[in-house]
Amino acid sequence: RRELDVLFLVGVDPLRDLPDGALARRALENAPLRVVVDPRLDPALEPFADCVLPAAPFVEKDGHLTDWEGRSQPVRAARGPLGLARPDWEIFAGLAAACGGDLGFDTLEELREEAAPLLAPREPPGPPAGAPPPARPEPGEGLALFTYPLLVDEGRLLDDAAELKAALAEEAFVEVNPADAARLGLEDGGRAVVRTAAGRAELPVRVTPHVAEGAAFVPFNSRGLRASALLSGSFTVPAAVEPVGGPVPAAAGGGEG
């Protein structure tokens, strides 16, 4: 909608991270000025970057990280920033000062004091009172495609981690329940075409009881597929899944979601 005059992209790539690649591209095209703050500039994002401010990577700055279990851990710099690179907080404090403003901190210690309440452990919120239970897909109505990232994938945090990817990364795939596989004529180890309103992909099939009947799973950003190409703003979307070459007669009544 062209509502932003300046867009800062800090350690994020909308083309890779958001569940609608086409919408992210249009949004980037509509922003008059785009500033990327990152240790490196992704080639796909480079055409949209009007200005790049080099941020120090984690090995060159003090800070903390939160692991997959929600545990906060301190991080100490192994060396100082190279070249013009600076920690993110220094970049924004400097920009604020140049604009005649003040973010309320001038040192990392002052920033940590302000951020401490935000980083304190807390109980996760429960569902709102009276919230309806999550909708379950109905067998025979196509499939509800859902996605999330695997631990080792093509995400930004694993750039240049070739050895780790070689040991643990997987090619993209689609997982379906045995009942849906039988209904749609899908075979474990075969290939299927996954179609949504946003796009299509051809993927190897895994048949597993660990996926609910009426649903299908694809990893969000594994090698061979950026799942955002199949999404339209949500990480769950109606989909048609059929074997390569078209549906078999037994699957004719399945329909497309």
Image (cartoon, rainbow, N blue to C red):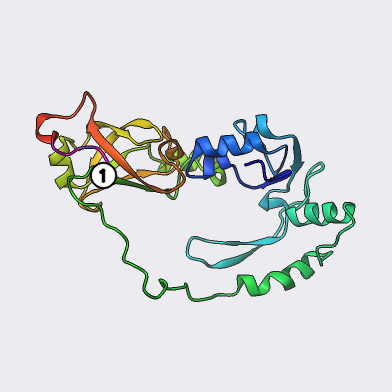
Instruction: Depth check: give the residue in front, 221 or 84.
Output: 221
Q: In which quarter of the image is residue 204?
A: top left
As drawn, 163 above or below 66 = above
Judged left or right of residue 159, residue 61 is right
Judged left or right of residue 111, residue 213 is left
Residue at which label 1 appears: 143
Question: Which residue: 67% across, 73% down?
Answer: 116
The span shown in magenta is: 253-257
Instruction: Depth check: give the residue in front, 18 or 135.
Output: 135
Instruction: Depth check: give the residue in front, 16 or 22.
Output: 22
Whether residue 125 is visible here, answered yes or no, is yes
Quadrant in the picture for the C terminus? top left
Question: Which residue: 69% across, 61% down?
Answer: 63
Q: Which residue lies furthest to the left in this view?
A: 250
Judged left or right of residue 32, residue 198 is left
Task: Report crowding for label 1: few under 14, some 14 to 19, many 20 or more residues within 10 A (C-alpha).
Answer: many
Q: Position of residue 229 (x, y in %)?
A: 44, 35
Q: Residue furthest top?
A: 245
Whether residue 160 is visible here, answered yes or no, is no
Q: Position of residue 21 (x, y in %)?
A: 51, 37
Q: Does the magenta stretch include residue 114?
A: no
Judged left or right of residue 9, residue 239 is left
Question: Which residue: 69% across, 69% down?
Answer: 115
What secondary structure is the stretch in magenta mostly built from?
loop
Which amino acid does the dot numbered 1 rest on? Answer: Leu
Q: Does the magenta stretch include residue 256?
A: yes
Quadrant in the picture for the N terminus? top right
